[in-house]
Amino acid sequence: MKKHIKVGVMPLEKFKQRTIAIAKGDYKPAADEPKIWFNSMKSLANVLSEENQKLLNLILDKKPQSVSDLVPLTGRHANNLLRTLRTLEQYGFVTLEPGESGKRGRAPLVPKVVYNTANIEITFDD
Protein backbone atom coordinates (compact mmCIF):
# COMPACT_ATOMS: atom_id res chain seq x y z
CA MET A 1 0.00 0.00 0.00
CA LYS A 2 1.48 3.31 -1.09
CA LYS A 3 -1.13 5.95 -0.37
CA HIS A 4 -0.06 9.55 -0.01
CA ILE A 5 -1.94 12.50 1.47
CA LYS A 6 -1.07 16.16 1.42
CA VAL A 7 -1.57 17.86 4.77
CA GLY A 8 -1.87 21.64 5.03
CA VAL A 9 -1.20 24.10 7.82
CA MET A 10 -3.14 27.37 7.62
CA PRO A 11 -4.26 29.87 10.28
CA LEU A 12 -7.86 29.30 11.35
CA GLU A 13 -9.11 32.68 10.10
CA LYS A 14 -7.64 32.11 6.65
CA PHE A 15 -9.06 28.57 6.59
CA LYS A 16 -12.53 29.96 7.41
CA GLN A 17 -12.23 32.46 4.53
CA ARG A 18 -11.17 29.65 2.19
CA THR A 19 -14.09 27.44 3.28
CA ILE A 20 -16.60 30.27 2.74
CA ALA A 21 -15.15 30.99 -0.71
CA ILE A 22 -15.50 27.31 -1.62
CA ALA A 23 -19.10 27.21 -0.34
CA LYS A 24 -19.98 30.33 -2.35
CA GLY A 25 -18.41 28.87 -5.47
CA ASP A 26 -15.80 31.66 -5.61
CA TYR A 27 -12.93 29.20 -5.21
CA LYS A 28 -12.43 25.65 -6.43
CA PRO A 29 -9.59 23.77 -4.74
CA ALA A 30 -7.03 22.27 -7.11
CA ALA A 31 -6.65 18.49 -7.15
CA ASP A 32 -3.14 18.75 -5.70
CA GLU A 33 -4.12 20.90 -2.70
CA PRO A 34 -4.04 19.43 0.83
CA LYS A 35 -7.02 17.31 1.83
CA ILE A 36 -6.35 17.43 5.58
CA TRP A 37 -5.88 20.80 7.30
CA PHE A 38 -4.47 21.93 10.64
CA ASN A 39 -4.58 25.47 12.02
CA SER A 40 -1.06 25.34 13.46
CA MET A 41 2.12 23.33 13.48
CA LYS A 42 1.41 22.64 17.15
CA SER A 43 -1.91 20.93 16.40
CA LEU A 44 -0.29 18.97 13.56
CA ALA A 45 2.52 17.91 15.91
CA ASN A 46 -0.02 16.79 18.52
CA VAL A 47 -1.96 14.59 16.10
CA LEU A 48 1.10 13.20 14.31
CA SER A 49 3.24 12.94 17.41
CA GLU A 50 6.06 10.42 17.52
CA GLU A 51 3.87 8.14 19.66
CA ASN A 52 1.00 8.35 17.16
CA GLN A 53 3.34 7.71 14.24
CA LYS A 54 4.51 4.55 16.04
CA LEU A 55 0.86 3.58 16.51
CA LEU A 56 0.18 4.01 12.78
CA ASN A 57 3.25 1.91 11.94
CA LEU A 58 2.14 -0.75 14.42
CA ILE A 59 -1.30 -0.95 12.81
CA LEU A 60 0.27 -1.25 9.35
CA ASP A 61 2.71 -3.91 10.53
CA LYS A 62 0.52 -6.06 12.82
CA LYS A 63 -2.88 -5.54 11.15
CA PRO A 64 -4.85 -5.91 14.42
CA GLN A 65 -8.40 -7.21 14.15
CA SER A 66 -9.65 -5.00 16.98
CA VAL A 67 -8.68 -2.11 19.20
CA SER A 68 -8.36 -4.69 21.98
CA ASP A 69 -5.61 -6.42 19.98
CA LEU A 70 -3.64 -3.16 20.10
CA VAL A 71 -3.82 -2.75 23.88
CA PRO A 72 -1.07 -5.27 24.76
CA LEU A 73 1.01 -4.19 21.75
CA THR A 74 1.02 -0.55 22.84
CA GLY A 75 0.86 -0.87 26.62
CA ARG A 76 -1.86 1.80 26.61
CA HIS A 77 -5.27 1.63 28.28
CA ALA A 78 -8.14 0.83 25.91
CA ASN A 79 -9.97 4.13 26.56
CA ASN A 80 -6.84 6.20 25.91
CA LEU A 81 -6.03 4.21 22.79
CA LEU A 82 -9.56 4.51 21.42
CA ARG A 83 -9.55 8.27 22.03
CA THR A 84 -6.30 8.57 20.05
CA LEU A 85 -7.68 6.40 17.25
CA ARG A 86 -10.86 8.51 17.11
CA THR A 87 -8.74 11.65 16.77
CA LEU A 88 -6.69 10.05 13.98
CA GLU A 89 -9.98 8.97 12.37
CA GLN A 90 -11.39 12.50 12.64
CA TYR A 91 -8.42 13.80 10.63
CA GLY A 92 -8.69 10.96 8.10
CA PHE A 93 -5.50 9.07 8.95
CA VAL A 94 -7.29 5.89 10.09
CA THR A 95 -10.69 4.26 9.80
CA LEU A 96 -12.35 2.23 12.51
CA GLU A 97 -14.40 -0.38 10.67
CA PRO A 98 -16.77 -2.85 12.33
CA GLY A 99 -15.27 -6.33 12.39
CA GLU A 100 -17.04 -9.63 12.78
CA SER A 101 -19.28 -9.93 15.83
CA GLY A 102 -17.65 -11.47 18.85
CA LYS A 103 -19.07 -13.74 21.53
CA ARG A 104 -20.95 -10.88 23.17
CA GLY A 105 -22.61 -9.92 19.90
CA ARG A 106 -20.79 -6.62 19.59
CA ALA A 107 -18.64 -6.12 16.53
CA PRO A 108 -15.09 -5.03 17.41
CA LEU A 109 -13.65 -1.91 15.79
CA VAL A 110 -10.87 -2.79 13.37
CA PRO A 111 -8.32 0.05 12.96
CA LYS A 112 -6.97 0.55 9.44
CA VAL A 113 -4.40 3.11 8.32
CA VAL A 114 -5.62 5.10 5.32
CA TYR A 115 -2.36 6.79 4.28
CA ASN A 116 1.20 5.65 4.82
CA THR A 117 2.82 8.91 3.71
CA ALA A 118 1.93 12.51 4.51
CA ASN A 119 3.44 15.52 2.77
CA ILE A 120 3.17 18.80 4.68
CA GLU A 121 2.34 22.13 3.02
CA ILE A 122 2.47 25.33 5.07
CA THR A 123 0.75 28.52 3.92
CA PHE A 124 2.62 31.74 4.79
CA ASP A 125 1.02 34.30 2.45
CA ASP A 126 -1.97 36.52 3.15
Image: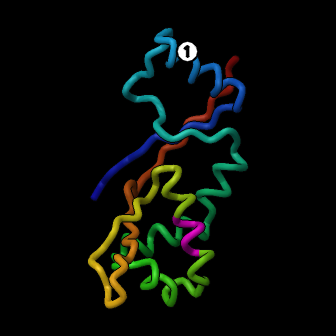
Q: Outermost residue, front direction? A: 105
Q: Main secondary structure of the magenta part?
A: helix
* Observer-nearest of 49 and 35: 35
Residue 79 vertical position relative to residue 50 in the rendered view, above or below? below
Q: Is residue 82 magenta?
A: yes
At 56% across and 37% down in the image, what residue appears? 8
Q: Is residue 8 left or right of residue 66?
A: right
Q: Is residue 118 left or right of residue 17?
A: left
Residue 67 vertical position relative to residue 20 in the rendered view, above or below? below
At 35% across and 65% down in the image, what residue appears? 97
Residue 62 visible at all: no
Please name the residue that numbered disc 1 is placed on: 21
* Observer-nearest of 51 and 100: 100
**Residue 41 image position (x, y, % from top left):** 69, 45
At 37% across and 27% down in the image, what residue appears? 31
* Observer-nearest of 105 and 108: 105
Q: Which residues are magenta?
A: 81-85
Q: How is the image coloured?
A: rainbow
